[in-house]
Image (cartoon, rainbow, N blue to C red):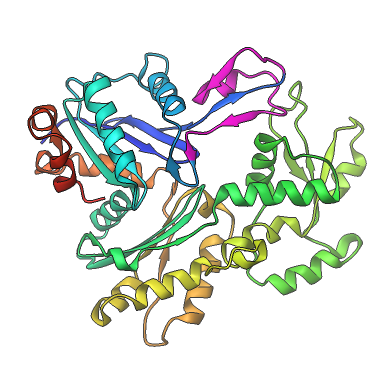
Amino acid sequence: MIDKAYILDNGGFTAKVGMSSAKPRVIPNSVMKAKSERRRPFIADQVEECRDASGLFYILPFQKGYLVNWDIQKTIWDHIFGKDCCPVNFNETPLIVTEPYFNFPSIQEAMTEIFFEEYECQSLLRINAGDLSNYHYTSNNPGTLACMVVDVGYSFSHVTPYIKGKKRREGIKRIDVGGKALTNHLKDIISYRQLHVMDETYVINQVKEDSCFVSLDFMADMEVARKRGNDNTIVRDYVLPDFTSIRRGFLRTLEETSKSTDGEQTLRMNNERFAVPEILFQPSDLGVQQMGVAEAIVSSINSCPKETQPHLYSNIVVTGGCSLFPNFQKRLLQDVRKLAPDEFNVRVTLPENPLTYAWEGGALLSKHPEFYSFVVTKEEYEEEGLHICYERFDV
């Protein structure tokens, strides 16, 4: 057993990092360039030092959910592991790093190589974030035989059944809609209806986080959004940041706007507030001919053995940034309940912090008495090469 490990949950939009003995930090997994300071790239959490974040240009190491831009990723990792962010000495600390499901062998090999040869890790565990979420859930609920991990991430949403701690590969469903698609769709809608914001990814992402919610009855909310005056309880104004007095925008009612004299720039948010997250449940709204999250869960459970199905329905756990939309868990429960057989009990758990849930699972896993039987050490890697990683890591 070890006293501490270093855990890097390397997501497509944010990296969750830190020692297992401390609290995790959530850091943007990208390099950003601003119009105001052209010469200087902002690496990861340096974006907080940026004076004017309008027209921020993102350079992402992940494209379509897979790590493709190694130079950028290496720059970000150098910053994260350095003294200004989350310092670590890999010679004496084991590393747990996450990667997506069905990651390409070439990416797996490059990742292993970088950590062993450039960062000189003494021991490494590569694992899917969903495996860590499942471990966290089963540690909190001992006696759970099966668990359904729904990860609504940045590039995709994944639905994965775990039976007795093992993922069932044929049950994994991927929907090509995540936080990135929602932000881009919101940019399209606002640019078409109000203001040209196609370059304002950073600001519109905040607009999405601050003003969107999941509708429990889409048609009824659409009717409300059509009404005028005080009958419309959905419409709000979003005050855009000017990066002098307002660092981050905020929502306010139309009355507050009419009383305001500061002349801030606002966006009128009406049905966009719930029509954008609706895409997670109806990807066809965006022209993606796939199942929504609820149908994917049911389809995945139906592909599992009969005797495991009631356990999967009653242990659905939701992680990832998009699960933070208000009402997401209620709507998911409502939709799965409609599609599930009547005799099964359906339960959807939304953890306290769905963003760091997998990271916390990694912290628990590092305390496992047999933790060292899961990792590959530098000696083993030097002796047997990449072959041992394929044997030991179930990704």
Could you tell me if residue 280 is visible in this image? yes
Does residue 240 show up magenta in the picture? no
Q: Nearer the viewer, residue 42 or 72?
A: 72
Write down the quadrant of residue 310 in the picture. bottom left
- Which residue is at a point 77% across and 68% down the rendered structure image? 222
The spot of residue 13 in percent (x, y) is: 50, 39
- Which residue is at a point 59% across and 18% down the rendered structure image? 49
Q: Residue furthest front?
A: 106
Q: For the N terminus, give its image quadrant.
A: top left
Residue 346 vertical placement versus 351 (above, below) = below
Q: Nearer the viewer, residue 391 or 246?
A: 391
66 displayed left or right of 30 = left
Residue 160 vertical placement versus 304 (above, below) = above
Write down the quadrant of residue 297 in the picture. bottom left
Q: Which residues are magenta?
A: 36-62
Write down the quadrant of residue 265 in the picture. top right
